[in-house]
């Protein structure tokens, strides 16, 4: 509004435009004085000028997906003394906002419940220790060359993605590849529960046999009930919101794979979570293992 008055003051005059725009002429002249001499600005205005580039930087460094609440916590982690309302106000000034989730798309084709493993989770998705409960699921991405399917395996202790795979086919093998990555990276002990939905690939003989060979206990939810695999749905929703919907349209599997690789690394090592008290999955796991060392020393 100030810029508009400045641009047209020679044609219409300051006072007439201020009357129409319902602002005091003194407000316009005050802005003009500050523009000539920034030292005349209020302490709040000076601090806003200092904080705006920092707010924008932290937002961009976190894939430009954080809303005000997470951005506020991220800035506090960087030792900025800033109020949440200030973050909200500066985000509006800059013109940035967090990403929002879209509608979910069903990708599951179920099998009869009587031939499937039992549900050993019962919607209790928070493990007490790492390598106690994994959840798996996959989604699809539309590209110029057809659909690309992306599978995830998540350790529910800290929501860490321990395995993933992108493929142009939704055959069982690509889900096995994601599982193999998780097994190689984590080397879980026996009795780890692996939970999924009732998708035909997850309850196939090939996939179930691999779970048994690795010492994992298979578990599946009920037919047509997203709550029985809610954590996986949440993780897939985050991937859709934070990369797929935000960075599309997509050209090829290679592009989806590369961006997912970068997102998974950021997700595990830099993305903060409210249920983890605003720390990252990696920090949560590190804190757990450090606690074990402390207990061993005390013993």
Image (cartoon, helix red, strand yellow):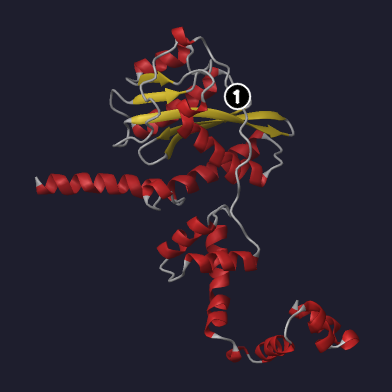
Name the one closer to the observer, 160 or 184: 160
**Position of 71 compared to 215: left or right?**
right
Q: Picture coordinates of residue 255 (x, y %)?
A: 64, 40
Q: Picture coordinates of residue 161 (x, y %)?
A: 44, 38
Q: Picture coordinates of residue 240 (x, y %)?
A: 60, 39
Name the one closer to the observer, 123 or 156: 123
Q: Is residue 160 above or below residue 188?
A: below
Q: Picture coordinates of residue 119 (x, y %)?
A: 39, 19
Q: Determine the residue positioned at 82% across, 79% down.
A: 20
Which image quarter is the C terminus in?
top left
* Residue 73, quarter of picture: bottom left
Q: Secondary structure at mark 1?
A: loop
**Position of 74 compared to 21: left or right?**
left
- Please identify the residue farthest to the top as the structure is shown: 114
Q: Determine the residue positioned at 36% across, 36% down.
A: 126
Which image quarter is the N terminus in?
bottom right
**Position of 24 compared to 199: left or right?**
right
Tally the marks. 1
* Residue 188, quarter of picture: top left
Q: Determine the residue positioned at 55% across, 59% down.
A: 59
- Please identify the residue farthest to the right as the structure is shown: 11
Q: Residues within 10 Å of mark 1 (few under 14, many from 20)?
A: few
Q: Which residue is mark 1?
A: 107
Q: Determine the residue positioned at 45% across, 7% down.
A: 114
* Residue 26, quarter of picture: bottom right
């Amino acid at each position: 509004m100030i810029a508009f008055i400045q641009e047209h003051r020679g044609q219409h005059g300051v006072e007439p435009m201020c009357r129409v725009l319902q602002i005091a002429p003194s407000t316009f002249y005050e802005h003009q004085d500050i523009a000539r001499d920034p030292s005349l600005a209020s302490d709040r205005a000076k601090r806003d000028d200092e904080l705006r580039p920092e707010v924008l930087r932290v937002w961009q460094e976190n894939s430009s997906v954080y809303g005000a609440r997470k951005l506020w916590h991220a800035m506090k982690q960087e030792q900025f003394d800033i109020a949440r309302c200030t973050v909200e106000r500066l985000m509006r000034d800059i013109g940035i906002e967090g990403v929002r989730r879209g509608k979910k798309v069903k990708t599951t084709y179920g099998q009869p419940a009587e031939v499937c493993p039992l549900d050993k989770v019962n919607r209790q998705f928070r493990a007490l220790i790492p390598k106690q409960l994994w959840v798996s699921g996959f989604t699809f991405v539309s590209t110029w060359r057809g659909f690309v399917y992306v599978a995830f395996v998540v350790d529910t202790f800290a929501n860490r993605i321990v395995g993933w795979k992108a493929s142009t086919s939704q055959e069982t093998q690509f889900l096995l590849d994601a599982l193999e990555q998780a097994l190689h990276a984590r080397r879980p002990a026996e009795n780890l529960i692996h939970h999924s939905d009732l998708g035909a690939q997850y309850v196939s003989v090939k996939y179930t046999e691999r779970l048994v060979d690795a010492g994992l206990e298979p578990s599946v939810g009920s037919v047509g009930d997203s709550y029985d695999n809610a954590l996986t749905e949440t993780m897939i929703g985050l991937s859709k919101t934070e990369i797929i919907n935000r960075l599309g349209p997509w050209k090829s599997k290679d592009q989806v794979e590369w961006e997912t690789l970068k997102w998974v690394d950021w997700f595990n090592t830099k993305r903060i979570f409210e249920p983890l008290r605003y720390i990252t999955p990696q920090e949560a796991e590190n804190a757990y293992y450090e606690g074990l060392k402390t207990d061993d020393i005390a013993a």
